[in-house]
Image (cartoon, grey):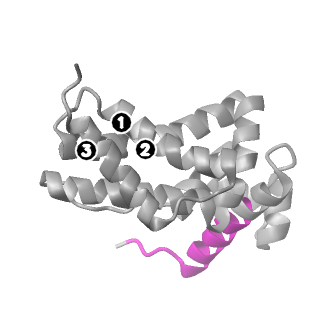
Amino acid sequence: MNRVDPRVTRSRRAVLEAAVAVLAEAGYGAFTIDAVARRSGVARSTIYRLWSGRAELIDDALNTLNVQPAEPIDTPQQARETVRGLVRHLDLGLNEGPVAACLPALIDGAERDAGIRRLHHGQNERRRARLAAAVAEATGRSADADLIAHALAGAVMYARLMTGRRLDAAQLDRLVDLVLTESKTPVR
């Protein structure tokens, strides 16, 4: 049995947290492995041993520090609760904690760097796909699930990026109810 050295686990966590902090504070253009090494107290050589470069490090940090909730979707009612949970998680991810602080840097980086664009779009695609799967189960409309997931996520993103007014928990639940109820109505 291979045991992971707890020092490696601590160092890895310190680097991931430092990467998110540096990205949030400095932006993508000023994000360097040197800055992450200084912030984390972990040697550059160790960082390069674990990650090939800054894009891979950022991707791992975001995947590790912002894990979607794993809720069952066995029935339409459970799926509806999963949709609620995923929308709440999106709201938290966009508005609280270290990953939320990275959002402007990620958007800027995605506009300027094709590698970060692929990373950012890939991250969001995986998360949206999970939401779309829950939507399909909750509504029975798999053909429209992707569009419905975009509508839900778009409302939360719009509130965060364009209005500065965060939707509260009751508004998030109402949003899910409105969109899912409307999506059960046959399209004419």
Of residues 68 and 174, the one drawn nearer to the viewer in this rendering: 174
Instruction: Please report the residue visible at 20 percent of the width from the left and 34 percent of the height from the top.
Output: 185
Please determine whether, in this image, residue 19 is positioned above or below residue 187. Answer: below
Whole-percent x, y for residue 27 in the image: 81, 50
Separation (CA) of disc 3 from disc 2: 12 Å
Crowding around mark 2 (Cα neighbors within 10 Å: few <14, some 14 to 19, many 20+) is many
Whole-percent x, y for residue 55 in the image: 68, 43
- Disc with the residue nearer the chain's start (3 vs 2): 2
Q: Amino acid at mark 2?
A: Leu
Whole-percent x, y for residue 187 in the image: 23, 23
Residue where numbered disc 2 is placed: 152
Whole-percent x, y for residue 78 in the image: 19, 59
Marks 1 and 2 close (CB-CB < 8 Å): yes
Q: Picture quarter containing residue 126?
A: top left
Separation (CA) of disc 1 from disc 2: 6 Å
Look at the image and give the residue range highlighted in magenta.
2-19
Instruction: Please report the residue visible at 21 percent of the width from the left and 60 percent of the height from the top.
Output: 72
Nearer to us of marks 3 and 2 is 3
Q: Which quadrant of the figure contains the C terminus?
A: top left
* Magenta run includes residue 57: no
* Magenta run includes residue 10: yes
Residue where numbered disc 3 is placed: 181
1 with respect to 41 (left or right): left
SS label for mark 1: helix
Q: Which quadrant of the figure contains the N terminus?
A: bottom left
Instruction: Please report the residue visible at 67 percent of the width from the left and 72 percent of the height from the top.
Output: 14
Residue where numbered disc 1 is placed: 148
Q: Amino acid at mark 3?
A: Thr
